[in-house]
Image (cartoon, helix red, strand yellow):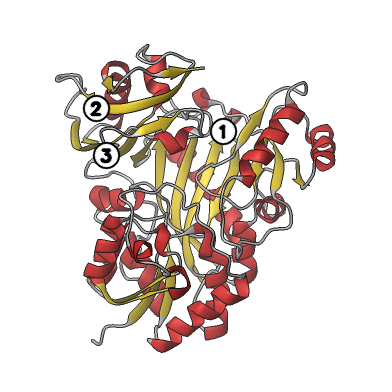
């Protein structure tokens, strides 16, 4: 059978390049389009080059020789990308037409809406224009959720301090203040009393102004204020060490939702995620309640053909609160870990769906009973403040290394991989916690509970070594 060609809009986020490109290239020809060359790491560039039949870069961002070079790591690409959404759509169409592609996909949150518009104009399967806009703008998303049969919560658009004061009065505290158009929980802020609320909003507004986003990203209001979804851990888990929220990975085919897997979590640091465990240990009743709400939420958005990543709050009396959803794959290593735990290649399944409208490899029901549990786990400066190795008022450090003692893993848990930031890295601990990950580990074992206990042991006993003397405030 002749191999079909798929256009991949290459940028940050979603399914990691080391898994995505190889999976897709086994069955399809990949044309990689790089609209923001500065948003591609060295490693990402290598996978693009290795597995693509053609690579197209936006020449508008290749003005000097250094523009062709890629950094070793990026969390958020700050350089300016000044193209309008219409210009981005036209660029995507131009490249897609040049190579006569039969599908377009991306792992990046910021290009979801332009991609949907390009797909519609080309007659290709995609998320759908209106649905993609709802999945990108958290105000539109919440309005859709509130009308889809899931738990409705108070929310309000916020552009100005006056808007915020009105939202504060309407929603009440505790509340969550979110940028409407970012991802990775960047800028998400919890406000639990009215006395500090205005200052917190103004600080968040100033912080948001410092975060670079493409001009193609459109929104009606930069913030949403939402009622806080209060979790109730004990109503869902009998074991300690998990969190009061999960994520659900799934697919949309012809506006119908199909679940893949539920990921358990370990407790967050504020809104920063710390570990994802493939897959859940929740009982059948819990899983069914979650899937019912997630199905309503995603189908309520009207998403047509795409991957979905839905975050869910586990509330009192097993009520399900939908935090948000995305019309793309989850980040971290959640998608490759589904393959490790269940031998289901979600990247290939998605491209099958986009090209053919179905996939023979799509599971007929939620994946449970994994071969092994796999955890994607990060260590942050906060962990070393909790275990006493960093003072609470430390603002800047120079990283040297992290050592994990022997014999602290529980049961048959093992470490598959362990990476840290580079020795000599200077870290500003006043920044959002997610910008300051120190170590990245993958754990595997036959018991999720033992993996969680191992994570707790690592957080407690891992030894952090620094260069020089930490700066305090």
* Badge 1: residue crowd in 10 Å (few <14, some 14–19, many ≥20): some
Disc 3 secondary structure class? strand
Q: Nearer the viewer, mark 1 or mark 3?
A: 3
Percent position (x, y) of residue 469?
Answer: 35, 17
Residue that carries the numbered disc 1 in the rendered image: 318
The residue lying at 70 percent from left, 39 percent from top is 226
The residue lying at 52 percent from left, 85 percent from top is 122
The residue lying at 30 percent from left, 37 percent from top is 421
Marks 2/3: CA–CA distance = 27 Å
Residue that carries the numbered disc 3 in the rendered image: 373
Percent position (x, y) of residue 21?
Answer: 28, 65
Percent position (x, y) of residue 30?
Answer: 31, 75
Q: Nearer the viewer, residue 144 or 54?
A: 54
Name the image quarter holding residue 167. Answer: top right
Q: Is residue 442 visible?
A: no
Name the image quarter holding residue 136. Answer: bottom right
């Amino acid at each position: 059978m002749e191999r079909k060609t798929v256009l991949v809009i290459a940028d940050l986020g979603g399914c990691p390049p080391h898994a995505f490109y190889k999976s897709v290239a086994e069955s399809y020809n990949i044309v990689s389009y790089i609209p923001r060359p500065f948003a591609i790491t060295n490693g990402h560039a290598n996978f693009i080059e290795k597995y693509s039949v053609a690579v197209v870069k936006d020449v508008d961002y290749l003005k000097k020789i250094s523009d062709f070079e890629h950094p070793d790591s990026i969390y958020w690409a700050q350089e300016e990308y000044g193209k309008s959404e219409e210009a981005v759509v036209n660029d995507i169409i131009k490249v897609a037409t040049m190579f006569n592609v039969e599908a377009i996909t991306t792992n990046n949150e910021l290009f979801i809406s332009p991609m949907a518009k390009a797909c519609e104009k080309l007659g290709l399967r995609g998320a759908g224009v209106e649905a993609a806009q709802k999945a990108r703008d958290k105000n539109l998303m919440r309005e859709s959720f509130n009308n889809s049969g899931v738990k409705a919560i108070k929310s309000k658009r916020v552009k100005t301090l006056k808007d915020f004061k009105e939202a504060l009065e309407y929603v009440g505290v505790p509340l969550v203040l979110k940028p409407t158009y970012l991802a990775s929980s960047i800028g998400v802020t919890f406000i639990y009393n009215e006395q500090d609320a205005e200052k917190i909003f103004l600080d968040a507004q100033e912080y948001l102004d410092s975060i670079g986003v493409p001009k193609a990203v459109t929104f009606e209001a930069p913030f949403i204020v939402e009622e806080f979804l209060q979790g109730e851990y004990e109503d869902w888990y009998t074991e300690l060490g998990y969190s009061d929220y999960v994520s659900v990975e799934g697919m949309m085919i012809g506006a119908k939702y199909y679940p893949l897997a539920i990921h358990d979590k370990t407790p967050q640091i504020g809104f920063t995620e710390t570990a994802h465990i493939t897959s859940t240990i929740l009982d059948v009743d819990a899983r069914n309640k979650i899937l019912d709400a997630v199905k309503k939420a995603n189908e309520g958005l009207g998403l047509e053909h795409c991957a979905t990543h839905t975050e869910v709050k586990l509330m009192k009396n097993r009520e399900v609160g939908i935090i948000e959803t995305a019309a793309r794959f989850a980040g971290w290593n959640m998608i490759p870990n589904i393959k490790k735990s269940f031998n289901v290649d979600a990247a290939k399944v998605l491209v099958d769906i986009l090209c053919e409208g179905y996939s023979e490899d799509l599971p007929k029901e939620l994946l449970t009973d994994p071969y092994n549990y796999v955890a994607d786990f990060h260590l942050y400066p906060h962990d070393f403040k909790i275990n006493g190795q960093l003072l609470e008022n430390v603002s800047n450090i120079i990283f040297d290394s992290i050592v994990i003692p022997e014999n602290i893993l529980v049961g048959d848990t093992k470490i598959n991989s362990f990476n840290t930031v580079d020795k000599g890295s200077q870290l500003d601990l006043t920044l959002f916690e997610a910008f300051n990950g120190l170590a990245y580990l993958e754990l595997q074992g036959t018991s999720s509970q033992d993996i969680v206990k191992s994570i707790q042991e690592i957080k407690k006993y891992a030894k952090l070594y620094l260069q020089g003397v930490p700066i305090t405030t």
